[in-house]
Image: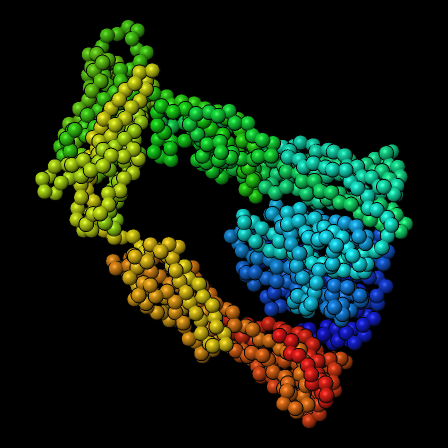
Amino acid sequence: MKKALFIIFTLFIVSQQLYGTHNRAGEITLRQLDEFTYEITITTFTYTLSQADRSSLEVQWGDNTVSSAQRTQIDRLQPKYTFYQKNSYVATHTFPGPGTYEIVVQDPNRNLGVKNIPNSVNVVFSIKTTITINPSIGQNSTPILLNNPIDKAALNQTFIHNPAAYDPDGDSISYKLTVCTEEDGKPIEDYELPEASDTLYIDPVTGDLVWKNPVETGIYNIAIDVEEWREGVKIGNIVRDMQIEVYETTNQKPEIDSLIDYCVEAGTEVEFEVVAKDVNFDSIEFEANGGPFAVDNSKAQFSIDNSSVTPGYSKGTFNWKTTCEHVRNQDYTVVFKALDNNPDLRLVDLSNVNIKVIGSAPDMPELSPASNSVTLIWNADPCTEVTGYKIYRKTSPIGYVPDSCVAGVPSSTGYNLIANIPERNNTLFVDDGNGNGLEQGAEYCYMITSIYPDGSESYPSEETCTELIAGMPALLKASVTEDDVSGTIDLRWARPAGLDTLPVTGPFEYRITRVPGVFEDGPEEQFIKTANSLDDTVFIDQDVNTVDPPLAHSYTVALYYENQPLSDTSKLETASSFYPDLTGNDNRITMNMRKDVPWINYDYTIYRQNQATGDFDSIAFTTNETYTDTDLKNGQEYCYRVKSTGWRSIEGKLYENTNMSHINCAIPEDNTPPCTPLLTGESVCDEFFNKLHWNFHSDTCFSDVSEYKMYYYETDSEDAPPADSFFFDNPYDTSYIDIRTEESLTGCYQIFAIDSFQNVSKPSVKLCLDECSNYILPNVFSPNNDGKNDVFIPQRTAYVEKVDFQVFNRWGMLVYQTDNPDIYWDGKIMNTDELVSPGVYYYICEVFEPRLGGIESYTLTGFIYVYSGNENNVTIEK
């Protein structure tokens, strides 16, 4: 019981309200130091005339541990808030592992007279922040809030405040109003938002809190939930408690002239003027907060032009020299605050400016085309923060010029992302169509962007384009004319261009190289075809095995004279025979057109062997690179052949071709597992069972399921063996009640779908149920033997192994203690037959429960109101 001394002190403060009315506002922020270690900063705003002052605060870390944070700094909020101070407390904590943790700090008490918090002087002040620790999302620190949560408003005038949140990791931030909290971070009962003549809201994007208009003077507290998001997933939130004092005044707040947002290239200097005016001709003070002032290097500056300051007028200049260190996905927000110096009441106007910093475009790449690939080379981005590049490609140019606020390459341009380069100094990329080769006849265009640590992209490089180079000679045909172990392949090419003026008449040699396979390295075989004429451009490759793997063969052709190459051998083209690459599945066979050719195939005719006649019958025609033959019989072999029709253009001349494929066979069989079930469930704690439900993303999945198998695990450990298993032989029976009455409902489940061929689906996501920890203690009881609330017992004790329950009176004396989960306190001082006096008592209860990680404990604290005699008309707090 580490908290006993603190609690006794707390009880003393509760009994002496004068000493506990100092807490006005605050929040908790965290900075990640390593994988599981964080530095926490607790910021509170307190009233200095109160005799209560804390040199340290206790932190509930959300992992069943508590420790103390020491105050490291005090700032007096003068002159606007003469009797207020800002307190900063710092502590370091290492969490046990990945998870979501709610961190709570509480301190008695709130100040007297908060109009929207009933009996505020007796309500504990608490603030909380939630973080998610997940190595897969990377390092994460919470946003920091740069504007203080203490402000003043004028009756019947619009009030505006902005917390000026800045996230050092560049995560996105959203805002919403929530409920102020009390003990253990629980919402304050009967809390209400302040009344407005029009509306009270917070802009979820900008964070502007707008109150139109306060209708009653006084003190009000508002809670702002600052949520942090990464890639669309919420990874944490800060609940900031803010206090606003509303005064009656004839003063009118100053007004800041309208401002615009900016999108700038990194390295650009952003400079603009900010002007404020006051209709009462009060002098004006300017402040500016926001991300540009919080960056590590090249911070922004905001300077006041004192020569222009006159009553009712002030002008400041914002200046920020951006660098590539400032590039990120999220905008930087600057909040400008104009504060008048009215002797009656000082009022404020706010205005926000968003600044987006985008990385400079990489240099335009140099393109080196070959017959079926393009090599890109570019200079490394000089910004050392760059982590790599993205490469985009389309056919035919569009002359894209990016908008100043648009980074990357929008999909509307028709460009597709073809590569991610992971290193800044890796500045060479060969585009070969992902190993399939680029097709002749198109103009290939490219743009490149630089990538920054948060995934943001720079402006794109200039568009640059090229056409592929036709080889010399250019290949035109590679057709299987006889499919056999001693088959033939008809290879043809175009007469080499640019050789008519050679001072030789022949004989020439065409050297043909054959390699087994497509896009594969293998043993080369070379053939020499002596040609008395350059027009002798046909080679029939005979006695070649066209029916055994690897089926296809790839060819190159080079022109020689007297053993000297007359064509550039580094730019020789490759053309392969092609074959239908078959994959058998359930009652179907899927065909991929496997080939490497420098011409464009625009259609395919599919032939399937007739099992009765042995002939190949035409069954389909397609322009796609894949085809699926359906309604087949599992276990039966089917053989196919394909005819392709293609074309290419060489120096303005059109060449058309047809090519026959190899014959290939496959057997359809069901080797596809069923869909993965989607498992959900909940614990029905009062009735001692877990209720499981499962379904699929589509109703069509049910037709491929014959049974299910479910496993139960006692823990969530990845290597934990299953403790139980269940079979379900009805595919449409998708729920199960697992009764577990012994110790705990805590556990994890996984389910698999199985089809009639015993193919097993991927396992569902492991569903872990750890819900039944609802150990609730009442806040009142009346031990007067009238049969109503005579004994202090928990509202539920399911699955609690033991407790360490202690009750203290206001002087810190222990009056009762037990380890019985049912407690059964009859109101008597322990070891006596004497009832305690009516009044308020403080309890500490450490609860030990079986959880996924084993027996774990957590601590409950609170007050018990003991009534006796005729004071039994009480309500148990639910």
**Does residue 307 appear left or right of residue 211 in this picture?**
right
Q: Give the quadrant of residue 618.
A: top left
100 and 705: which one is in front?
705
Examine the rendering and report whether any part of residue 565 can be seen: no
In the image, residue 298 sits, relative to residue 348, either above or below, namely above
**Does residue 745 appear left or right of residue 220 in this picture?**
left
The single residue placed furthest to the right in the displayed view is: 343
Examine the rendering and report whether any part of residue 114 can be seen: yes
State the image coordinates of residue 761 (x, y, percent, origin top left). 34, 57
Which residue occupies 73% across, 33% down? 271
786 and 161: which one is in front?
786
**Does residue 375 appear left or right of residue 31 in this picture?**
left
The single residue placed furthest to the bottom in the displayed view is: 833
User: Count the marks: how many?
Assistant: 0
In the image, residue 387 sits, relative to residue 131, either above or below, namely above
Which residue occupies 20% across, 20% down? 538
Which residue occupies 32% across, 67% down? 728
The single residue placed furthest to the left in the displayed view is: 613
In the image, residue 820 sits, relative to residue 357, either above or below, namely below
351 and 125: which one is in front?
351
State the image coordinates of residue 842 (x, y, percent, origin top left). 70, 78
Q: Give the quadrant of residue 240.
A: bottom right
The chosen color scheme is: rainbow
State the image coordinates of residue 819 (x, y, percent, origin top left). 59, 83
In the image, residue 52 sits, relative to residue 512, either above or below, namely below
Quadrant assignment for the C terminus:
bottom right
State the image coordinates of residue 573 (x, y, percent, origin top left). 31, 24
Which residue occupies 52% across, 37% down? 388
Quadrant assignment for the N terminus:
bottom right
